Amino acid sequence: MAVSFATAPPAASTPSSSSTEPPPKTTVPAIILSHVDAFQRNHAADAPNSKASSAHRAAAAIRDEISQLALASSLEGLSVHDENNDHGDDTEEERAEMIQTQIANTLLRCMDSAMLTIFNSASKTSWADSISSIFHLVASLACSCKNDEEGVICKAVIDRAIQYSLVEKDVIRAESCELLGMCIGHLAEGSKAAVSILKGKKSGGKVKKAVVSSPPSDSKKVKESLVEWKLECILSAGYAIHPRLTDKSVKVRTAAISAASCMFAPTRCEHYNASEDFVELTNTMASTVLWLLSNDSSASNRALAASGCAVTADSIPYIIQQIRDQDVKVREAALDALREKSNVESLTEDQKVEILKSGLTKRCPSTHAKTVELLCCSWMKHSKFDPISFLRTLNPVLNESVAESAARVIINVASTLDCESSCDMGVELVRKQFGAPEIRSFQECVLKKMTIVPEVEEDRKAEAGDEDEDLLDGGEKIGSVDPVKALFLRVKCALATESTTMSSVVKADTISDIISDIPTLCNLLNKHLDKLIEFNNGSTDNDDLDDDEAGAFEDDQNFICLQLIHMAESSELEEGSRRHFISIMRSMLSRLATPDDLVETCVKAMAAAHDTEAQFLQTISEILVDVEDDETFNHSSNNGLLIVRQMRAISILSIVLENISGHMMTNPILEGFRRHLEPAITSKNPIVRQHGVGCWSKFALLCDQDTVLERDMPLLLQIASQEEEIVDVRAQAALALCDLVLIHDKIHASDDDSATSHFDSFKKLLLEMLEHSKPAIVIIAAEITAKLLLAGSFHDPHLLACLFVIYFDTSLIETEEDDDNDENAVTEVGNPVRLRQLLTIFFPTYSMSSLEANDTMMASVAPTISIVNRKLDGKNSPKAMSQWPIAKMIEYICCTVDLADKKKVEGDDDETNGISSEQPMETHENEPAENDNTASDDKTTSIEASSTLLASIDIAEFLMDDSQNAPPLFVRALAKILSSASIDVDNEDLSLLSRLKSHVAEAEYSINDRPALAALEKVSCLLEAVEDECEGESDDERDDESDEEEDEICDDILVDAMKRASLKVGPEVEKENVRLSAGSMCSTATKQSEGGTRRSTRRARLADINN
């Protein structure tokens, strides 16, 4: 919809719908309005960038026509502001001032008309393109008038836009911010030439062309005044935009972020950095934009903030954080900002690693593609497409996985970049960014032939006299390997082996270019291994290295050895090469001086090199014998040498047991390995015992159940039960027992007395460990208990109560915060933070797993209260009460039970609806017809005891029996829970309500604390009606009647369950949750209802309690 340019009211006036035709094209307003009208019609559908360029040209055309009009009027002696062309005697300065005033008033008229159109329109689509065109032209014309030395026109437009930014209507505030952003952009672009001309003037350059209609002697003053008023306009616009960044409207924040981004462009406003006000404003706005980058509720705004913010050392961490944003648009915008506004040198090693780790993810192909574009088109291009040079900036020795991912991406892109099409989005993005020369250069640098063995000329070898001397060859020592090059070639070799598109010939050629032959590779491996061993033995050649350099040298040599082993493993080994490689691996494992970091890789590589597992085990047995006979390792004592041998044997066996199949347990060689572990379990060294127990448990996992019950479980139980044993050894034994119970599920369900005895002993052990004084043992036992409960190995309310007490114990987390700040430790077994995270998921999952589990959850209230009372140990202080908040614990248990019941009811309803829609009700042939009538007449309902009532009974029972042995504050807290409980007396079971009333009455006689008695009095008042319903019956009569009702109910429930089972399809149908445990057998009652069975209206929850 085009905008009609009437004599629009000012911003504060009431909008009017009147409009008139533009005046004839003989005055300044007529010229401007005609161009604006034509521009909004001809360029409404243009793209924003194209529209801005067109606005520049249109503004230049308007200025030319106005100049011609002014010149003609001056020659004819006419007044430029008189539409009747009357003669006037205006001076040149007055004439210029009149033209500026008319331009300003006309532009304000255009703005007012545009805003009036917005105000009167209901849909943005009807005016968006036209209004955008008008504002582009208005901003371009207002900010580019060369004769406006004081900025009168621009100031007038910005002041009117600022007024509109304060109105109530959101869309007008948004459009005013858009206009202010356009003005800032034009002012910044138009000021660069002026500043550069000023610099030229100071250096003796020619500046006469920079000033129009001004004396040459006044050029410096003119340019300084230009910069001054433009800076003033930018500051005014910036101060108006800043509050709108936190506007309540999303569209206003969007427009403000877009406008603020014009001030962050380094190529635009950098010449204003001399102004302290400008620097302060931009810093304030940048801080606000960075806050929006992380906290704005709109994903579009977060993406816009990522694209518009300045990429500096302060903002880079915020941008990197958004690579993990939940919205893909934000992630892409953050990666694009890093690619366009930063280079590899402006990022630290940790930042590059974090970007690649977050971006090269398989979960989002779009994010992965944008990261590939950043890696190849920015970082690799800055490194002149040299993969080794770029990977060196990632420090592959410390960041191997990230460097390997980057190397794989680089090689894959180079291999497919010249293809006509690719299914990889990242390759397509790189292809769009690169031209033909860049593609060729990228492929030549990445795919060029490289070998792992350094090539050295023979004459240089002769000059050196020894191949091992430190003669440099292209920055590398003769006979040595660069760690970065080793990683890159290893990845290249692995990709060739894994490729499904390469032919076998091409694969062989690629690998042979990297590895000339296996013996040469093994010689190189031995050379670096010798260097590493010499360094570990304290060689004098490295005495001049400081601690950091020594650590880096050791890491480099370890890394190179690992890469060489992986490289040989991924190559296609022929028979001769395979035997030679196995012999090298055997010698390395048999050598006690070989670092432990290489053992796992050597064992796995040797396992891959063998044809069968039997041959592999035979070689391992020979290696273990060689380890016991190795005398080359230097140690100060025989006992120390024995420990080293035991640890090497345990390390080898642990890896072997993790990588062999279960059917190999019948192999006599494997069974003979136990003799190497028996001395380790009984060793005096705790580290040896710990690793020995762990390796023994891996043996047990491969054994059958009878062997486990006869030999492994008794031994592990004995180790885990020893109080004098260190925590690590006991924890390792307990974890092994947990694994055995989970794998051999018949242990806890077996009729064998020995199995039952071992299982009961293990449960008793867990109870002891859960209440141990050492937090480490408690945490390990809690994690084991959670696993076994969730697996259904047992359902014990006492064990579950211990988990609740541990979960709410704040002292464990505080201890962890004081002792350990390592983020990686959170994922380790035995960490309190990890345990808390597991239990947060465990409790609701366990409660929903089965009916029996949910009943166990409800039954844990009473033991939880007892355990907390035991933990308090008579401490009557608020601090002790805050460590175990009993009210929150009971509330959490009830909420978890209610949630499980709700999910169960929803599942039953869905299942019932499904059955009724698929299968019609059928009558059994053998069932009498009158049974249907009897069933319909005798419809009964089982009233489910609410979690609140059951928990209240447990609380009242504790107060009745143990209130004298509990701290007064604890008794008071329990009484307060009772008084705040929401109990539906009308719908709950009368027998349970009667029990609660009896317990409360007896608790009142046992308690002397006045606040607690006042709380119990509220409960007594609530239960007064219960006595009326049960009045007149003796205790014996009520008991007999209750027993009869329970028998009848059980029979009815059984009949109903059989009927429901006859209608369900499937081999297994879980029983309906009518809560027949944890007090439900005593809470079940029958009530006649005319409309059919009635469930409890809701499971009441404990009310909010003010602690």
Image (cartoon, helix red, strand yellow):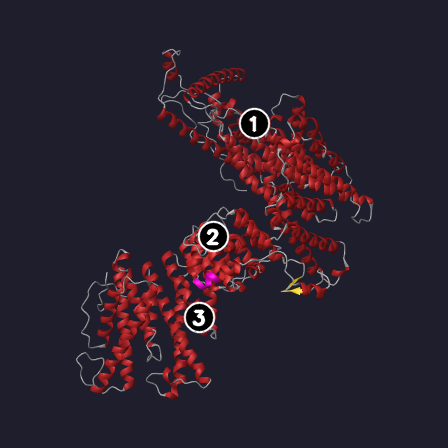
* Residue at the spot of label 3: 267
Q: Which of label 2 and label 1 is nearer to you?
A: 2
Q: Would residue 405 be found to the left or right of residue 580 on screen?
A: left
Which amino acid type is marked by label 3?
Thr
Residue 256 image point, x, y percent: 39, 62
Which amino acid type is marked by label 2?
His
- Say how many tags the image has: 3
Q: Residue 999 carries which label?
A: 1
- Crowd around label 2: few <14 · some 14–19 · many ≥20 (10 Å): many
Residue 591 image point, x, y percent: 74, 46
- Asked if residue 38 is positioned above or below residue 637 in the image, the reply reads below
Q: Would residue 756 be found to the left or right of residue 318 on screen?
A: right
Point 52% across, 64% down: residue: 384
Residue 195 image point, x, y percent: 43, 78
Query: Which quarter of the picture shows residue 151?
Result: bottom left
Q: What element carries label 2?
A: helix
Residue 226 image point, x, y percent: 38, 79
Point 37% across, 61% down: residue: 255
Q: Of 212 and 1088, which appears nearest the observer?
A: 212
Q: Which of label 2 and label 3 is nearer to you?
A: 2
- Crowd around label 1: few <14 · some 14–19 · many ≥20 (10 Å): many
Quadrant the C terminus occupies:
top right
Q: Is mark 3 on a helix, strand or loop?
A: helix
Quadrant the N terminus occupies:
bottom left
Span of residues in magenta? 436-440
From this viewpoint, is residue 601 visible?
yes
User: Which is nearer the N-term, disc 2 or disc 1?
Assistant: 2
State yes or no: discs 2 and 1 in contact (Cβ < 8 Å): no
**Is most of the magenta stretch helix, strand or loop?**
helix
User: Which is nearer the N-term, disc 1 or disc 3?
Assistant: 3
Q: Is mark 1 on a helix, strand or loop?
A: helix
